[in-house]
Amino acid sequence: MGAYADAYERSIAEPDSFWLAATDLIDWTRKPSRAIDDSAAPFYRWFPDGELNTCYNALDRHVESGRAEQTALIYDSPVTGAKSSYTYRELRDEVARFAGLLTELGLTHGDRVVIYMPMVPEAVIAMLGCARIGAVHSVVFGGFAPKELAARIEDAKPKAIVAASCGIEPGRIVEYQPIIAAALSETAHQPDKTVMLQRDQATAEMTERDLDWRDAMARAEPADCVPVAATDPLYILYTSGTTGKPKGVVRDTGGHAVALAWSMANVYDIGAGEVFWTASDVGWVVGHSYIVYAPLLVGATTVLYEGKPVGTPDAGAFWRVIFEHGAKALFTAPTAFRAIKKMDPDATELAKYDLSRFQTLFLAGERLDPETYHWASAKLGVPVIDHWWQTETGWPIAANLRGLEPMTVKPGSPTVPVPGYDVRILDQQGDEAPPGQEGAIALRLPMPPGTLPTLWGDDERYREAYLSRYEGCYLTGDSGYLDEDGYLFVMGRTDDVINVAGHRLSTGSMEAVLAAHPAVAECAVIGVRDELKGQLPRGLVVLKSGVEIAEETLRAELVEAVRRDIGAVAAFRDVSVVDALPKTRSGKILRKTMRGIADGRDEPVPSTIEDAGVLDTLRQVLRKDG
Ligand code: COA
Ligand code: AMP
């Protein structure tokens, strides 16, 4: 039996002993005596009697074991011209000081801290500083509008906010203080303090609540690591669900540390002293797991890149970073490679750099289209590894495990289920689909360590959203199939979640924005295929009878409203007025049929449709550009 088959079988047949063995990858203040606690199933907990500190595992233990002078973090920011690096000792000292600052502010174990920062080292310092004292961070992506920030503040109820004065986007500075002020004007919950990092590109106007990062750090005394229960939350990360209200995915401490350390060795083949670069954002799960926690847990060097893949300054930005910092592997979203390919189709910029140390490209976050796969493989000449996971799981569900047993790549497939994940393809009735037949991708419970134990403060929503569809299974929200060789093919979401340039968004929340417009009677937002961003949102609205408004005016108002309420990152630009939306006789909007039409597929007309004639008009509207 190969290494993969052996590990996979053991992980499913004997999860307890399999994961207990993996606890050796982590230093514990109290080593767990058992792995899984199923006493409250379907809610599972990992390592119930274990005790540890994640920050200690990410920093201090490497300082103590001879890696103090090794680089822990490289900051490379073409948008500001800044470059710097921190050794493990320097990063530990900064984090300890920040943890001391939090303690002085009265924060303690279990308190929440919202972090609203761009890709600067201070964001990593803030995250690890929280972990050091057992506070729970919730990082909010900088591209979200005040309303989205407000929703997260209201739900997480942070005692403090840690922010920077601005983020930097091509051609504009995004000032954060007005966004925070607007968010706080909407929330009943008010944090006690805000720690503000002033950046050169914008100065935040300080209020009574605000402390200056540098001043406060200069005064702060370092704080030690506080051991916490393995089952205590490390962070909350909000992600888009079907409704407008974001879901607060909870990450535990012990399971997370074990799973991420295991994944670095077995999936990514990265160990201590090696350089790993994840080009994402700390506001997304990919950033949490593979910019911050996983590389540091294993004593590697992580690269924090503030910039876009192209135009910073040219299409060679990624090659320069790989070369300059000697990255062994890069992990990013396929959309980044589509952007590079669009700007430099022959990859002429690549010839300027010696990438001989570069071994693997990992892609995830959205579907990897075969064209991008072939282009990246041909140009880079290294394995291009698609892998599939989601915010909820925190680490890969399906992958080609480069450290455990590399496998042949099949374009279009993220390869095989990762040990710990019992992947099932289920039909409407809950029966298992045979190889080759598409169905809902479900994960048989319990899921492995590192995956979400619940949603923040909302066990019921967790149960309802993920566990209620198929008894004993977690519903991923994706559909797909397994082939005869056990390779998984992920075909797309079955719900109202879309993926725009690797950013996960909810069409439901965009619909709520459109529906609030006084001229709109009803509406639908669907994800349509886009060559660069993978998917783009497309709105369709039906006007209230008697309303007169020029389509251009309405369109501009709706686009502005989505930008104002959700954020620029929604990339919502396209909306059309139609006479009616296709519905079933019971009034349910047929979104899947609309998606099929928009993507040029000939979906069968559902027998439940109320008026099939509506589809003809829709075809004209949705395919007018194609
Ligand atoms: N703060 C504020 N605004 C942001 C932002 C941030 N952190 N990130 C994006 N935005 C804004 C952009 O400025 C843009 O605004 P505009 O409409 O005024 O131009 C809008 O949101 C859309 O941004 P984006 O989708 O990033 O498009 P882009 O044209 O700026 O860049 C790519 C396209 C492909 C280069 C870019 O999306 C990319 O690098 N994607 C990788 C995605 C990724 O890392 N995903 C994480 C999972 S691995
Ligand atoms: P997020 O929670 O932001 O990581 O988004 C998770 C969703 O992105 C998944 O449920 C999938 O729909 C999609 N996704 C992530 N990785 C892949 C992949 N490799 N192939 C296809 N879809 C993916």
Image (spheres, rainbow, N blue to C red):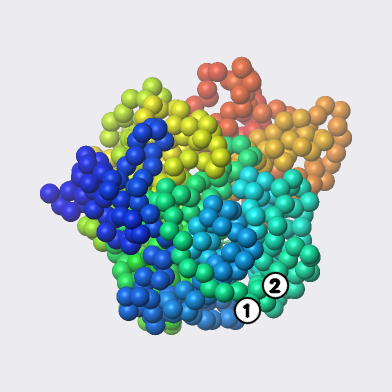
User: Closer to the camera: disc 1 or disc 2?
Assistant: 1
Q: Which mark is residue 255?
A: none
Q: Quadrant of ligand 1?
A: bottom right
As rendered, which of 276 and 626 lies closer to the eye?
Answer: 276
Residue 76 horizontal/vertical position (percent): 52, 77
Secondary structure under tag 2 reads strand
Q: The residue tagged with tag 1: helix, strand or loop?
A: helix
Q: Position of residue 8 (x, y in %)?
A: 23, 46
Query: Does 591 sit left or right of 22 as displayed?
Result: right
In this view, the residue in front, 521 or 176, is 176
Where residue 121 appears, as percent x and y from the top left, is 55, 72
Q: CA distance from mark 1 to mark 2?
A: 10 Å
Residue tagged 1: 218
Residue tagged by mark 2?
212
> How many neighbours does mark 1 have within 10 angstroms: few (below 14), some (14-19), or many (20 or more)?
few
- Left or right placement of residue 458 versus residue 475 in this view: right
